[in-house]
Image: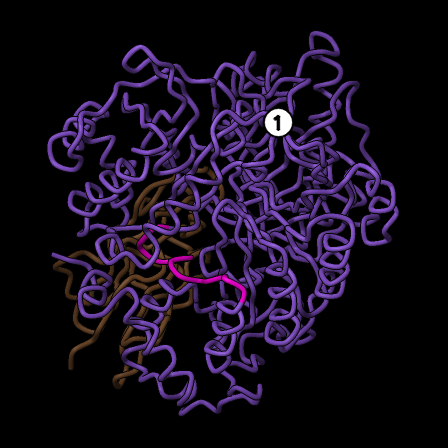
Chain colours: A brown, B purple
C-alpha cells in the first residue's frame, strides 16, 4: 500500500495520507549520543524539512534544540510513528527514541 | 525533484482558485476530499485563506492586505462589520472576547474562525468597498508595505503611496508573477525617517537622489534579499541600482521575474531570494537583471537618505513609531493610536471607525508596529478626538511598555508557533507598566514576542527580542523564551543578539526588570540609548545583565498550549475540540 507523506506549512507538519499528523514544537526524548551528550536529551523540534517511509515506519528529518545543553542541530530520520493496519499511529514524543539507520532491520520504536 | 507544493501550483494556481473556493463553499467543508485537502489548503493561501491549526479544522484565517496599510474611508468599517458577522469562534479568548481584528506587522488585517461556506459572501462585501484578499498569503507578491503616512508626511522625499499603489495594481492578479518560488515581500519607503523597514524585505525601494543628464532626479535606490525567518536573518543588500518613479515598476517586475526563473523550486527552505543573493552576490544579480529582465540601461545607485533615518534607529531622541499627534504636509494632523499586540475587539473597532469619520476623513492606516492611524484631522478637532472614551485604551500617548509591544499570532491559531503569544504579551506589558520604572530619558522601548523562528513579530529588530522556545522546569516541559538584545533599524541596522536562551516564560518579566535596572546602573549617562549600551558589550557581559527570576507575575500558559484545541477553552483538550464543524457550527462527527 502506498503511503503519502510530506512536510507542510513551512515545515510545521508531517502529513501522512493527506492528514496533518505530527507537529513541530513538541519535546522529544532521545537517547544519549543520538543528538548530544545529555542523558536523555530533551529535544524541541523546531521544523521538519523532509520525511520518508521505511517499511511501516514514518521518519522525519528535522531541526531541533536540546533543552538542557542548548545544542541545536539537524536530526536525520527520526521515527515519528508507524502504520498499523493502514492507519498512522504516532509515537509518543516523551518515549525514549533512537534514530533509525537506513539499513536497519528493526523498526524504530518508542520504549 | 519539484516539491509537492510546486506540483500543486503547476496544476492549478492564481485566479483559477477562486471558482474552486466558491464550489467548495457552496457544497460545504465536507466536499473537500480528504486526500486533496493538503493541496487545496496550499492553494487557498493565494486568496488569503490559511487553514487554522490542529483542533481547529474547517476554520480559516483570512488576511486582507491594503497596500501601504491605507484603508480608505469606509474600508475599516467594512472589515469590522465582516469580523462582527463572520469571525466568531466556538470559545472566548479571556482577554479579547470573541470577535476582533488583528493588525499585522505587514500592514494587513487578519480575521480568524472564518468558515469556508461564508467566504464568497465575505469576498463580495470586501470587493464592494475595493478591498481584497488576493495574494495575501501564498507564493507571490504579498501586501506591499511602506511609510504608513505616505502622501501626507512632512518628511516625505518621494511619494511612496503612489508607487505602492502602482505595484499593487500591476502585480496583483498578474499571471506572469502569480506563481513565484516562495513568498515575495516588497517595501516602499518615501520619507527621510526610514519607516518602510526596507532592510527586512525581499525587495526594498528606498528614497534617493541622482544626477541624470545634469538634473537632480528624486527616486529610489534598490535593495534585495532581506528577511528574518528561520534563524537566517538577512539585511537587504544594495544592488547598486537607482530607479526613477517611472522606472520603478519595471525594475520591480524584472527582479520578480528573475526570482520566478532562478529561485529554488526544489527546496522550499532555500527558496527565498535572500538565499539566491547569498549564492550570486549583488553584482551578479544586477548583471542578470540588466541583461535579461529590463530593456533600458539601469542607473547606478543614487545618494540615499539613510544617515537621516530615525525610525527605530536606536537613538535616544529618534522617532520610533507613528503613535501620537503629528502635523501633516497640508496643515491637518494624523493621530497614531496604540493597539496593544495589534488586536482590536469588534465593539471598540466600531467606536474607532466612528471616531475616524467624525474627527478626520474616515481614512484609517495600519502601521508595521501593529498600530492604527487616523489621518486628516483638522487642528480644531484634535481635542474632541482625544476626549473620545475609546482613546483611553487605544491611546495616542501610551505607556512605553504598551507602545513598544508587538506579538505574533502564536499557538492560539498558528501551526508553527511554539508558545502562546498575544495574551502573554498583554500580561507582560501590564506587569511591566505596573512594576518597572524605565530609566531616565527612555521613552521608547520595543519588546517583540514571536512564537517561533518564522519571526512574524520581527523580534530581531527590537530592543528586547523574545522568541518561543521550551525548557524544563521542576522536571516538566514548560513554555519558554529566548531573549535577544539590541536590535533595530536606522542607517546601520542591527539584528538582536540572542544572549540568554530558554528562559521559562514566567521568569521573563523579572528578567526584563533586572535588565533595565542593570542598564540604568551601568549606562554611561542619561543620553545613552539602550541600543548603544548593548552595542558596547559582548554577549557574555549582556547575559550577565539578564537575570531571569520569578516575581509576582503569573503565567497561565506555561503548559503545552499547542496540545490544546484552543488554549483558553474551559476544556482545552484536543479531544474536546468542536472542529471540524459545519457552517452552522455543529461539529462534524469523525469517521472513526
Q: Does B587 sit left or right of B523 as displayed?
A: left
Q: Which residues are magenta?
A: B129-141
Q: Say which element carries label 1.
A: loop
Q: Nearer the viewer, residue B126 or B8?
A: B126
Locate residue A35, reporting x and y percent: 33, 45
For disc 1, the neighbor class at 10 Å (few under 14, some 14 to 19, many from 20) is some
Q: Nearer the viewer, residue B257 or B100?
A: B257
* Residue underneath mark 1: B154
Q: Residue at x 64, y 30 (%)?
A: B329
The correct choice, above or below, for B484 with respect to B58 in the image is above
Is residue B134 shown in magenta? yes
Q: Residue at x 66, y 72 (%)?
A: B84
Q: Residue at x 47, y 18 (%)?
A: B306
The correct choice, above or below, for B459 with respect to B359 in the image is above
Q: Does B260 sit left or right of B328 as displayed?
A: left
Classify residue B369 by image quadrant. Answer: top right
Locate residue B265, reporting x and y percent: 19, 51
- Furthest residue toward top: B524
Is residue B477 visible in the rendered image? The answer is: yes
Q: Residue at x 32, y 32 (%)?
A: B224
What is the magenta segment's predominant secondary structure?
Answer: loop
Q: Nearer the viewer, residue B483 or B493?
A: B493
Amino acid at each position: 500500500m502506498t503511503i503519502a507523506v510530506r512536510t507542510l506549512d513551512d515545515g510545521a507538519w508531517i502529513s501522512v495520507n493527506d492528514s496533518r499528523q505530527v507537529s513541530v514544537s513538541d519535546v522529544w526524548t532521545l537517547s544519549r549520543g543520538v543528538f548530544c551528550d545529555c542523558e536523555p536529551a530533551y529535544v524541541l523540534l523546531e521544523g521538519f524539512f523532509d520525511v520518508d517511509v521505511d517499511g511501516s515506519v514514518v521518519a522525519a528529518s528535522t531541526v531541533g534544540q536540546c533543552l538542557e545543553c542548548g545544542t541545536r542541530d539537524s536530526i536525520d530520520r527520526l521515527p515519528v510513528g508507524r502504520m498499523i493496519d493502514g492507519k498512522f499511529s504516532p509515537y509518543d514524543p516523551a518515549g525514549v527514541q533512537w534514530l533509525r539507520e537506513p539499513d536497519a532491520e528493526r523498526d524504530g520504536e518508542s520504549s | 525533484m519539484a516539491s509537492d507544493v510546486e506540483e500543486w501550483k503547476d496544476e492549478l494556481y492564481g485566479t483559477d482558485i477562486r471558482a474552486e473556493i466558491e464550489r467548495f463553499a457552496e457544497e460545504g467543508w465536507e466536499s473537500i476530499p480528504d486526500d486533496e485537502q493538503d493541496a487545496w489548503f496550499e492553494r487557498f493561501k493565494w486568496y488569503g485563506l490559511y487553514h487554522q491549526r490542529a483542533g481547529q479544522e474547517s476554520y480559516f484565517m483570512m488576511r486582507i492586505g491594503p497596500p501601504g496599510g491605507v484603508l480608505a474611508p469606509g474600508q475599516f468599517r467594512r472589515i469590522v462589520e465582516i469580523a462582527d458577522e463572520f469571525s466568531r469562534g466556538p470559545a472566548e479568548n479571556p482577554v479579547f472576547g470573541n470577535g476582533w481584528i488583528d493588525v499585522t506587522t505587514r500592514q494587513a488585517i487578519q480575521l480568524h474562525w472564518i468558515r469556508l461556506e461564508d467566504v464568497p459572501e465575505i469576498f463580495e462585501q470586501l470587493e464592494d468597498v475595493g478591498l481584497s484578499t488576493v495574494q495575501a498569503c501564498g507564493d507571490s507578491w504579498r501586501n506591499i508595505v511602506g511609510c504608513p503616512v505616505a502622501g501626507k508626511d512632512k518628511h516625505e522625499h518621494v511619494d511612496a503611496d503612489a508607487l505602492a499603489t502602482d505595484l499593487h495594481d500591476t502585480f496583483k492578479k498578474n499571471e506572469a508573477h502569480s506563481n513565484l518560488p516562495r513568498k515575495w515581500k516588497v517595501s516602499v519607503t518615501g520619507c527621510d525617517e526610514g519607516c518602510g523597514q526596507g532592510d527586512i524585505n525581499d525587495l526594498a525601494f528606498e528614497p534617493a537622489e541622482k544626477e541624470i543628464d545634469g538634473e537632480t532626479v528624486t527616486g529610489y535606490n534598490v535593495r534585495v534579499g532581506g528577511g528574518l525567518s528561520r534563524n537566517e536573518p538577512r539585511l537587504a543588500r544594495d544592488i547598486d541600482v537607482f530607479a526613477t518613479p517611472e522606472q520603478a515598476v519595471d525594475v520591480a517586475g524584472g527582479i520578480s521575474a528573475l526570482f520566478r526563473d532562478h529561485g529554488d523550486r526544489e527546496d522550499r527552505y532555500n527558496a527565498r531570494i535572500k538565499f539566491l543573493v547569498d549564492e550570486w552576490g549583488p553584482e551578479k544579480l544586477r548583471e542578470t537583471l540588466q541583461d535579461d529582465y529590463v530593456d533600458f540601461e539601469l542607473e547606478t545607485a543614487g545618494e540615499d537618505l539613510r544617515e537621516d533615518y530615525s525610525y527605530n534607529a536606536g537613538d535616544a531622541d529618534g522617532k520610533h513609531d507613528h503613535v501620537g499627534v503629528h502635523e501633516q504636509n497640508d496643515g491637518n494632523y494624523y493621530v497614531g493610536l496604540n493597539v496593544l499586540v495589534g488586536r482590536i475587539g469588534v465593539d471598540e473597532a466600531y467606536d474607532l471607525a466612528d471616531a475616524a469619520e467624525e474627527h478626520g476623513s474616515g481614512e484609517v492606516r495600519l502601521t508595521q508596529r501593529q498600530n492604527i492611524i487616523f489621518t486628516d484631522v483638522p487642528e480644531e478637532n484634535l481635542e474632541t478626538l482625544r476626549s473620545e472614551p475609546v482613546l483611553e485604551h487605544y491611546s495616542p500617548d501610551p505607556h512605553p511598555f504598551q507602545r513598544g509591544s508587538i506579538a505574533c499570532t502564536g499557538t492560539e491559531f498558528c501551526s508553527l508557533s511554539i508558545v502562546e503569544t498575544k495574551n502573554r504579551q498583554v500580561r507582560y506589558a501590564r506587569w511591566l507598566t505596573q512594576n518597572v520604572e524605565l530609566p531616565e530619558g527612555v521613552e521608547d522601548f520595543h519588546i517583540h514576542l514571536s512564537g517561533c523562528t518564522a519571526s512574524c513579530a520581527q523580534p530581531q529588530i527590537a530592543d528586547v527580542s523574545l522568541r518561543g522556545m521550551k525548557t524544563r522546569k521542576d522536571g516538566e516541559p514548560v513554555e519558554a523564551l529566548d531573549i535577544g538584545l539590541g536590535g533595530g533599524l536606522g542607517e546601520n541596522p542591527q539584528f538582536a543578539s540572542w544572549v540568554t536562551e530558554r528562559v521559562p516564560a514566567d521568569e521573563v518579566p523579572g528578567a526584563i526588570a533586572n535588565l533595565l535596572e542593570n542598564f540604568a546602573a551601568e549606562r554611561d549617562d542619561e543620553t545613552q540609548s539602550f541600543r548603544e549600551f548593548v552595542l558596547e558589550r559582548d554577549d557574555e557581559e549582556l547575559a550577565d545583565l539578564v537575570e531571569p527570576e520569578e516575581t509576582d507575575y503569573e503565567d497561565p500558559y506555561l503548559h503545552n498550549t499547542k496540545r490544546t484545541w484552543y488554549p483558553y477553552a474551559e476544556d482545552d483538550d484536543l479531544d474536546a475540540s468542536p472542529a471540524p464543524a459545519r457552517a452552522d457550527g455543529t461539529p462534524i462527527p469523525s469517521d472513526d
